[in-house]
């Protein structure tokens, strides 16, 4: 995985790396959160991992990696109101663009096709945006357009204005019945910015605009020593330990869940040969997403942690 992403998003990097290596990546992915630039970087890196002809290492120089990094790969396309279009509409992803996407799907290809749907602007970047831009560019990646004068191409979240329900609905069939070598990735601020028919057919990942680059996992080891066995008598203790960790270290409750997710992806790596166990871990990771949703809905943290702890004893 690209080193910047690895450092900033160890959990997502780990998760996607294992999902790709086990060919379990969903055909339609939504990345949501406030930072579209990092989402774009992640989408491009996924495209690279899906197409690499060698060992997927960050500095790989195979033809596919080279093309994807320079954003010139014929099968990895950014679809926005200003990218990959031949008509005059300036404010929306047009039906012509969608038809172009659907047309390319008719023919088989040796490549794994990746379509990155986002909004985009050529604009003057703020200091923070520029810093992030340069950081990612320095790892060898390029945006789809170079920009003009002091303005640069920058991704924005897709929404119902630039990606109308008519355009979105005309893609549903392809999302529902995908062929094996196609991945759709939607970048957005909020899942509610996309029509529900797309959301329900996709796997959504929250890309936090986080400054935490390190996940603590040590304190899980005690409770997960016999995983997937989990003692019922330990559940309340475990919930209490999560809460204590959150309070003593002054971190967000969702960060504690992030740590647990990271720990679980490490377990996948360590047990990749054990298919049954890996399936169970994926199920558990999915359940931790529910805990995050509960936190977002302002359910009491203690309740969320206890609920999660008892889930593990089932
Ligand atoms: Zn490669």
Image (cartoon, rainbow, N blue to C red):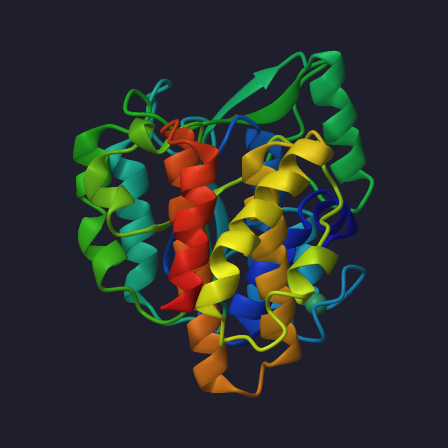
Query: Farthest residue in the bottom direction?
Result: 273
User: Where 23 sits versus 286, above or below?
Assistant: below
Quadrant of the image occupied by residue 146 = top right
Residue 85 vertical placement versus 291 (above, below):
above
Quadrant containing the N terminus is bottom right
* Left or right of residue 98, residue 109 in this image: right
In the rendering, at what x and y percent does residue 29 appear?
41, 50
Left or right: 280 with respect to 239?
left
Residue 185 visible, this orientation:
no
Q: Position of residue 224 (x, y in %)?
A: 60, 69
Q: Position of residue 227 (x, y in %)?
A: 54, 75
Q: Name the residue located 33 percent from the left edge and 49 percent from the top edge.
A: 101
Q: Quadrant of residue 182?
A: bottom left
Task: Tell me the quarter of the picture where residue 27 sits.
Answer: bottom left
Q: Position of residue 70 (x, y in %)?
A: 69, 47
Q: Residue at x 27, y 37 (%)?
A: 96
Tally the marks. Answer: 0
Q: Nearer the viewer, residue 3 or 290?
A: 290
| Front residue (pair 300, 116) | 300
Residue 268 appears in the rendering: yes
What residue is at 69 percent from the left and 40 percent from the top? 142
* Quadrant for the C terminus in the image: bottom left
In the drawing, does residue 40 fall left or right of residue 3?
Answer: left
| In the foreground, 232 or 121 | 232
Q: Quadrant of ligand 1?
A: bottom right
């Amino acid at each position: 995985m690209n080193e910047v992403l690895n450092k900033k998003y160890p959990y997502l990097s780990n998760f996607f790396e294992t999902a790709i290596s086990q060919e379990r990546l969903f055909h339609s992915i939504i990345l949501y959160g406030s930072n579209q630039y990092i989402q774009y970087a992640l989408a491009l890196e996924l495209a690279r991992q899906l197409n690499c002809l060698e060992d997927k290492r960050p500095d790989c120089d195979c033809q596919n990696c080279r093309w994807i990094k320079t954003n010139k790969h014929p099968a990895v396309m950014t679809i926005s109101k200003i990218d990959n279009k031949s008509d005059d509409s300036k404010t929306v992803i047009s039906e012509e663009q969608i038809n172009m996407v659907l047309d390319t799907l008719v023919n088989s290809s040796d490549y794994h096709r990746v379509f990155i749907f986002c909004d985009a602007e050529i604009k003057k970047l703020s200091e923070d945006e520029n810093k992030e831009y340069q950081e990612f560019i320095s790892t060898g990646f390029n945006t789809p357009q170079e920009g003009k004068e002091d303005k640069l191409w920058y991704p924005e979240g897709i929404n119902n204005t630039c990606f109308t329900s008519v355009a979105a609905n005309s893609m549903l069939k392809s999302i529902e019945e995908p062929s094996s070598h196609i991945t759709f990735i939607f970048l957005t601020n909020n899942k509610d910015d996309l029509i529900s028919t797309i959301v329900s057919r996709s796997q959504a990942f929250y890309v936090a605009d986080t400054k935490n680059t390190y996940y603590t996992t040590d304190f899980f080891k005690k409770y997960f020593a016999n995983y997937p066995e989990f003692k019922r008598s330990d559940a309340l203790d475990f919930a209490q330990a999560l809460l204590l960790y959150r309070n003593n270290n002054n971190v967000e409750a969702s960060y504690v869940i992030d740590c647990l997710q990271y720990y679980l992806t490490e377990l996948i790596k360590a047990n990749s040969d054990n298919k049954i166990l890996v399936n169970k871990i994926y199920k558990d990771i999915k359940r931790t997403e529910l805990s995050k949703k509960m936190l977002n809905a302002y359910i009491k943290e203690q309740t969320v942690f206890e609920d999660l702890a008892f889930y593990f004893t089932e």
